[in-house]
Structure formats: structure tokens, C-alpha cells
Image (cartoon, grey):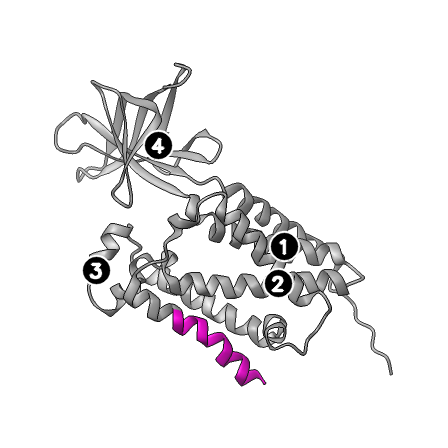
């Protein structure tokens, strides 16, 4: 039985490898809000329908809740994260220029590949199935079980379903003029609903001339209401301009003694709060396990 389950789980992975090789990365842009919400709801409801009567004779149901699926999906997820860690993750345009079998399989933009999407789909479907089953069957410490499993599901699904709504763009900000025209990582022009202008820039250097730290003071003026605000940006210290939209300082002009512009990165990620809720729930569930101790099982003679 275990061998059959592994074979069944291999089919979608093999199909994803073939699609990735011939068609390229997963088209997340087709599943932007609200389509991702609708499909996500249909997905979870379908899992619920399969488990509604606790029918474990169905092959799909047995695969969804089997321990072998737990082991195999976690193994695939670890392999996927290793690929992400071992290979430089590039923008979509840069990744498309990579040649060879690894480039064709999306290793240089792996989180957007059909392979990684299929891995996440298997893992999240399995996690949803055992969470729904556990909610129906567990009588003791159900809240702790739900915090752990729903929390992990939200943390992963927030990135999975929300990937289509993530927009990452870079924009040069100058001293002498305002600018609101950015360029996305896919090479498309994006016009922000606010203007930005560089007001001051300060950099510190090591003795060898390499930058030690740099700070940019930027004026942001809203194009709708005309309100302005001054912000200070440092590397690795983003500024949240609005809910789900962060501004990062990533680079600056190094061609002259005094920089004439800096490069800012705009990251629009509205689903990050869903992921944050999932992380908080998981931590609360782990704390509950620590405080309450392991669940005791009684065995009948």
C-alpha cells in the first residue's frame, strides 16, 4: 500500500517537471485576487467533501490522510527548500536567460516553478485533510491541534495563494525631480500612486572604500490627496508606507563622489498578514504543547 501511495504522489510531480520543461514557470498572474480566493475556497471545500463521511476506502482519501503522504510531502518540501538555498534565486527575466537543464526546470526561480507549486499543493492538501479529520475526531486538546495545524497551513498557504498578488518593483529616486515610474521584476512599467524625491543621502565607508552603511531621506507625496511625508530609509530597515506595501533601500549611485540618486524597492505583499497570523497561531500551539505536555493516550486491554 505504501508503495502505491508513493507512486500516486509521484504522478503530479512528474507532470509538473514535464510542464516546467516545455512551458516555463507557473503563471501566477492569471490567479490574482479575487480568483485565488475563489479557487482556494473550492479547493478546501473539495477536501472537506472527500472526508465528510470519514470514508477511507476511497483511494484519494487514503492518500490524503496517510502517514506516507506526510513523510513524502515533507521530503519533497525539504528538497525544494534546498534547491532554493543552493541556487541563486533570480528575477523572472534573469532566470529565463539561464541555459541548460537546470534553467529549464526553473531552479533559478524555483518558488515560481510548476515543480515547487505542485509540492506545495500536495503538502497543503494533505495538511488540510488531516486538520479537517482531526477537528472531527479529536475530543481532547482540540484547540492545541487546530492552532498548530491551521497555523502552519495559513503560514504556507498565505505565500502559496498570495503569490499572484505580490508585486516587486524598483525605482530610481533623484534629488532634482520627483519620480513615480518603477520597473517590476518581470520588466514591466509600474506607475505608483505617489511620487518620491531624494532629499538627503549619507554613506559611511570602510577604509578600503566599500560602503559600510548608507541612509536616504526621501519625500513621499500622495498623488491623490497631495499629502507629503518624509521618511528615512536604511538597508534592511524597510518602511511600511501602507498596509502590505513596504519600501526598501537597496542601492545608490556610485559613479561620483556625491550620489545623485538611490534605488528603492517596492514590495506589495497583502497576504503577509495572513502568514503572520499563521506563525502566531503555530507559536501559540507550540506553547500549549510545552505547557500542557504531550497528550496522554489510554489503551484498552
The quarter of the image holding the N terminus is bottom right
Q: Which corner quadrant of the image does residue 106 belong to?
A: bottom left
Magenta: predominant secondary structure element? Answer: helix
Q: Is residue 184 magenta?
A: no
Q: Mark 3 sits on what residue?
A: 98
Q: Mark 4 sits on what residue?
A: 234
Whole-number angstrom distance, CA of label 4 to CA of label 3: 32 Å
Q: What residue is at 59 percent from the left and 63 percent from the top?
A: 127
Whole-number angstrom distance, CA of label 4 to CA of label 1: 35 Å
Q: Mark 2 sits on what residue?
A: 47
Instruction: Tell me whether circle 3 and circle 2 mark residues in contact (CB < 8 Å).
Output: no
Mark 3 nearby-residue class (10 Å; few <14, some 14–19, many ≥20): some
Q: Residue furthest right?
A: 301
Whole-number angstrom distance, CA of label 2 to CA of label 4: 45 Å
Q: What residue is at 29 percent from the left and 44 percent from the top?
A: 185
Tell me which numbered mark, 4 or 1, is placed earlier along the sequence. Answer: 1
Q: Is residue 285 visible?
A: yes
Whole-number angstrom distance, CA of label 1 to CA of label 2: 15 Å
Tell me which numbered mark, 4 or 3, is placed earlier along the sequence. Answer: 3
Whole-number angstrom distance, CA of label 1 to CA of label 3: 38 Å
Magenta stretch: give its range: 1-15
Mark 4 nearby-residue class (10 Å; few <14, some 14–19, many ≥20): some
Q: Mark 1 sits on what residue?
A: 150
Mark 2 nearby-residue class (10 Å; few <14, some 14–19, many ≥20): some
Closer to us: 44 or 76: 44
Give the number of the mark in front: 4 or 1: 1
The quarter of the image holding the C terminus is bottom right
Give the number of the mark in front: 3 or 2: 2
Instruction: Tell me whether circle 1 and circle 3 mark residues in contact (CB < 8 Å).
Output: no
Amino acid at each position: 500500500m505504501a508503495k502505491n501511495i508513493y507512486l500516486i504522489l509521484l504522478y503530479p510531480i512528474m507532470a509538473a517537471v514535464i510542464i516546467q520543461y516545455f512551458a516555463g514557470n507557473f503563471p501566477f498572474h492569471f490567479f490574482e485576487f479575487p480568483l485565488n480566493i475563489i479557487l482556494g475556497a473550492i479547493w478546501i471545500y473539495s477536501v472537506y467533501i472527500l472526508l465528510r463521511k470519514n470514508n477511507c476506502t476511497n483511494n484519494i482519501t487514503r492518500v490524503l490522510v496517510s502517514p506516507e503522504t506526510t513523510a513524502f510531502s515533507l521530503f519533497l518540501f525539504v528538497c525544494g527548500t534546498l534547491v532554493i538555498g543552493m541556487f541563486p534565486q533570480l528575477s523572472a527575466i534573469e532566470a529565463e536567460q539561464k541555459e541548460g537543464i537546470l534553467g529549464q526546470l526553473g531552479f533559478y526561480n524555483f518558488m515560481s516553478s510548476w515543480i515547487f507549486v505542485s509540492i506545495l499543493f500536495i503538502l497543503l492538501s494533505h495538511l488540510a485533510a488531516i486538520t479537517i479529520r482531526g477537528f472531527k475526531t479529536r475530543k481532547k486538546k482540540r484547540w492545541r491541534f487546530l492552532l498548530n495545524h491551521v497555523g502552519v497551513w495559513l503560514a504556507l498557504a498565505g505565500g502559496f495563494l498570495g503569490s499572484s498578488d505580490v508585486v516587486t518593483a524598483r525605482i530610481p529616486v533623484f534629488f532634482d525631480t520627483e519620480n513615480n515610474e518603477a520597473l517590476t521584476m518581470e520588466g514591466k512599467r509600474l506607475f505608483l500612486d505617489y511620487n518620491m524625491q531624494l532629499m538627503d543621502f549619507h554613506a559611511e565607508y570602510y577604509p578600503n572604500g566599500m560602503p559600510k552603511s548608507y541612509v536616504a531621506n526621501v519625500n513621499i507625496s500622495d498623488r491623490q490627496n497631495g499629502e507629503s511625508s518624509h521618511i528615512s530609509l536604511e538597508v534592511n530597515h524597510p518602511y511600511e508606507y501602507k498596509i502590505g506595501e513596504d519600501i526598501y533601500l537597496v542601492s545608490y549611485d556610485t559613479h561620483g563622489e556625491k550620489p545623485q540618486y538611490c534605488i528603492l524597492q517596492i514590495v506589495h505583499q497583502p497576504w503577509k498578514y495572513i502568514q503572520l497570523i499563521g506563525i502566531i497561531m503555530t507559536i501559540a500551539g507550540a506553547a500549549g504543547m510545552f505547557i500542557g505536555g504531550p497528550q496522554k493516550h489510554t489503551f484498552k486491554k
